[in-house]
Image (tube, helix red, strand yellow):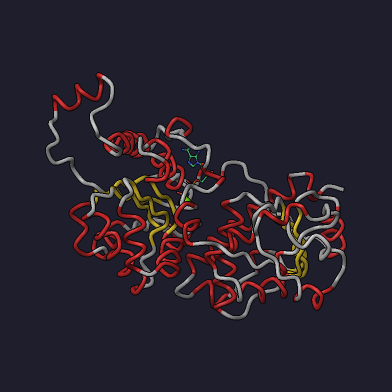
Amino acid sequence: MGCATLGQGGGAAALRWGVVSSSLAETNAVPTTGPEVLSARLPRVDTGRLVADMVPPPRFDAVRFETYVPDERRPSQAEAVRRLRTFAAQTGSGNGSGSGERRRWFRREPRTPQGPTGVYLDGGYGVGKTHLLASLWHAAPAPRERKAFGTFVELTNLVGALGFQQAVTALSGHQLVCIDEFELDDPGDTVLVSTLLGRLADAGVRLAATSNTLPGKLGEGRFAAADFLREIQGLSARFASLRIDGDDYRHRGLPAAPAPYTDEQVTEAAHRTPGAALDDFAELTEHLAVVHPSRYGALCDGVHALFLRGVEQISDQATALRLVVLADRLYDREIPVMASGVPFDRLFTEEMLAGGYRKKYFRAVSRLTALARDAGRTAVAAG
Ligand SMILES: Nc1ncnc2c1ncn2[C@@H]1O[C@H](COP(=O)(O)OP(=O)(O)O)[C@@H](O)[C@H]1O
Ligand SMILES: [Mg+2]
């Protein structure tokens, strides 16, 4: 809870001086009466935290194989759960200390080749790939600090922050590394991450990844497994690919996205919501340029709802891509967003939505719309 006094109408100029760290020491500050301002925060994150933070996001804290409801009309869903449970069971210490069950397993199958040490979940948008990947992470009987979960982008950020060799060192003692939304559209990053995974696989780390698929009609009938297996170079023999058919689970009975509010409504709601952050869109997008995207999660620490005034269509790609990362972090943390200005489906230009990064933009629109809907449903926007 930094910048306690800065939310009180100090204006943009005053905020520039409010250099804030996310350190807990600041919790002793004067109790906050007004909303926080994300544009006034400059989170510093130590590299140890970057690795320790690689766990499923809050939205997927409670998901388990048991809470995944396979669609009976889509046998590939139940089959995926079955194979992932087996994969999870094979992860872990294997130090022989265990139960009779484990011993029986050893007798039947004395540590011969274990089958593939990597698994790739391919499927359309919303079929539950992240749900299953997080369930795998939760189910794998390895100590928490020896399994990692992150998106492809978070992994590339980690390599950016630590350097390649240190990232290899930091992760090669792990028993399981889960990579959500493996991206194949940037050849440089794909090679970087594939090389990293090769090193980890050599060190005995089990790997699981999901495909990065496009929401809505644009993604129909597109499966990425062949591209993935080709692009990960020498690793393909180590990956089993699991295809999950189905429809977007989220489209069951969702109400339409709420229309934007007025600036006054947003400001008022921010002032009566505990844990609120209130930002002007233009200022926030400018601020995102000076915070490393790997810290956008930390930027949102302690924020329970975001209030955004004056959302505008974005005209440049760099700003747009930063907003995509922010949208992901907000979505991970289930932070509702109440906004004025243009609706989120007009955030990106037509040109962007037709270009090379369209997957990211569609995902961001879909996520921000879901968070706007959350804000509309909760007390946040009431009154
Ligand atoms: N079969 C299912 N049973 C229960 N919840 C599901 C199922 N499929 C998806 N969900 C839920 O729907 C939401 C979207 O699923 P997600 O795993 O994010 O999809 P994907 O990663 O494939 O796009 C999540 O909240 C997830 O928990
Ligand atoms: Mg997903």
Q: Which of 381 and 77 is in front in this view?
A: 381
Examine the image and state in which quarter residue 6 appears.
bottom right
Q: Estimate the x, y position of residue 377 in percent, counting from the top left.
A: 73, 45
Q: In this view, does 74 lie above or below 260?
A: above
Q: Estimate the x, y position of residue 66 in percent, counting from the top left.
A: 45, 30
Q: Nearer the viewer, residue 217 or 185?
A: 185
Extreme residue toward the top, this view: 100
Q: Nearer the viewer, residue 254 or 91?
A: 91
Q: Nearer the viewer, residue 147 or 371?
A: 147
Q: Estimate the x, y position of residue 209 in percent, counting from the top left.
A: 35, 52
* Quarter of the N terminus within the rendering: bottom right
Residue name at image x 28 percent, y 47 percent? 206
Q: Estimate the x, y position of residue 146 in percent, counting from the top left.
A: 37, 45
* Residue 35 located left or right of residue 231: right
Extreme residue toward the bottom, this view: 316
* Residue 270 located left or right of residue 257: right
Residue name at image x 69 percent, y 51 percent? 373
Q: In this view, does 85 lie above or below 258?
A: above
Q: Is residue 215 above or below residue 104?
A: below
Q: In this view, does 73 lie above or below 133?
A: above
Examine the image and state in which quarter residue 153 appears.
bottom left
Q: How many numbered markers are drawn?
A: 0
Residue name at image x 33 percent, y 49 percent? 174
Residue name at image x 45 percent, y 66 percent? 157
